[in-house]
């Protein structure tokens, strides 16, 4: 336990890293399948079947990362878990209802008679919207320090919309990768529209975070940190330009570079997440609790870490195996 120095220092940092990694992986992986659900109303019935088939082997495993993140928050940072969940219990409840609705409708629409399929499609879309909007709302409230005012509620409503658009964008880029023909062409058009929502969302959060917290403003705009961090927005801007140029040339006759929009969007999400992590560190509850103040006892964290070292490789291995086995273009999904 003392191998890496004071366990009261490195163990909270290790678990904060694991928590951040779990949230990031969840946002990327479940983000694209939530986005596919958000795009449902813009597709015809045959296209909806292929859209569902593109996420069929992955969607339930993707949500494992959310369970892992909440579990780490509960056992490693119990006081932060209580503070955050108390402030956000209503949007969390909405998110859970949305996830349940998605899961049920996903399974039932495959077996449902044709006259009932539309209802399950609507349920799948509704669950996707509920989940995406609630997560965006929680993101906004977190950035605002979990304070409830007219301004923070309005800001959270805006971030709810922007995160939903971001999910629809990464969902569209996933469809570019996994489909072909008319649906792939539609996905390119959806991506062209969604990219501007992503730009506005990233810009809004980037501007709001330092304005609402003098501490964050100081971290970003003091010297020499300003120049050391400058590559983050520059790389993000360059990626957005490359994404737009790629989307203007897709789809290609040989399907080359169909992977690029999805890969570039993942990098864009990672850059945005890194910027947020830097802004809020060392706080786990903005300007209220640091990871060191909220952490469980070092002895407890060490035992939990041992268990995590067994569980995490299995989750990573299964995820890698699923995406390897089901690589390539989506085929018809059937439970027969």
Image (spheres, rainbow, N blue to C red):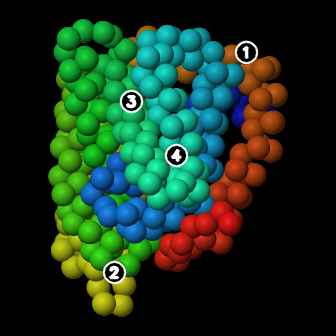
Read off the residue under disc 3. 134
Q: Position of residue 310 (x, y in %)?
A: 80, 44
Q: The C terminus appears in which quarter of the rendering?
A: bottom right
Distance CA(mark 1)–CA(mark 2): 56 Å
SS under mark 2: helix
Q: Are marks 3 and 2 in contact (CB under 8 Å)?
A: no
SS under mark 4: helix
Distance CA(mark 3)–CA(mark 4): 19 Å
Read off the residue under disc 2. 181
SS under mark 3: helix
Going 45% across and 25% down the picture, which residue do you hit? Answer: 94
**Which numbered circle lies on residue 297?**
1
- The 10 Å Cα crowd at callout 1, few under 14, some 14 to 19, many 20 or more, is some
In front of the other: label 3 or label 1?
3
Distance CA(mark 3)–CA(mark 1): 32 Å
Q: 231 or 27: which is nearer to us? A: 27
**Disc with the residue nearer the chain's start (1 vs 2):** 2
Left or right of 299 in this view: 247: left
Read off the residue under disc 4. 105
């Amino acid at each position: 336990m003392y191998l890496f120095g004071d366990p009261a220092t490195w163990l909270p940092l290790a678990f904060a890293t694991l928590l951040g990694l779990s949230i990031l992986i969840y946002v990327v992986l479940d983000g694209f399948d939530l986005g596919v659900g958000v795009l449902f109303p813009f597709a015809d019935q045959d296209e909806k079947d292929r859209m569902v088939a593109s996420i069929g082997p992955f969607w339930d495993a993707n949500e494992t990362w959310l369970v892992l993140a909440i579990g780490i928050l509960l056992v490693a940072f119990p006081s932060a878990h209580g503070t955050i969940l108390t402030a956000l219990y209503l949007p969390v409840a909405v998110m859970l209802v949305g996830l349940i609705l998605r899961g049920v409708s996903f399974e039932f629409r495959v077996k449902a008679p044709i006259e009932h399929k539309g209802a399950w499609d609507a349920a799948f879309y509704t669950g996707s919207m509920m989940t995406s909007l609630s997560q965006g709302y929680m993101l906004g409230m977190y950035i605002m320090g979990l304070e409830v005012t007219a301004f923070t509620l309005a800001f959270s409503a805006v971030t709810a919309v922007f995160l939903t658009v971001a999910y629809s964008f990464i969902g569209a880029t996933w469809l570019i990768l996994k489909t072909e023909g008319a649906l792939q062409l539609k996905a390119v058009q959806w991506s062209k529209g969604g990219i501007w929502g992503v730009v506005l969302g990233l810009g809004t959060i980037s501007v709001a975070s330092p304005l609402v917290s003098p501490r964050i403003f100081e971290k970003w705009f003091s010297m020499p940190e300003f120049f050391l961090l400058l590559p983050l927005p520059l790389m993000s801007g360059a990626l957005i330009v490359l994404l737009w140029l790629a989307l203007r040339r897709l789809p290609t006759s040989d399907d080359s570079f169909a992977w690029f929009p999805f890969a570039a969007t993942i990098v864009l999400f990672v850059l945005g997440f890194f910027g947020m992590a830097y802004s809020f560190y060392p706080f786990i509850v903005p300007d209220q609790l640091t990871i060191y103040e909220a952490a469980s006892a070092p002895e407890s964290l060490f035992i939990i870490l041992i268990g995590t070292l067994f569980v995490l490789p299995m989750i990573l291995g299964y995820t890698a195996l699923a995406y390897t086995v089901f690589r390539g273009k989506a085929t018809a999904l059937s439970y027969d």
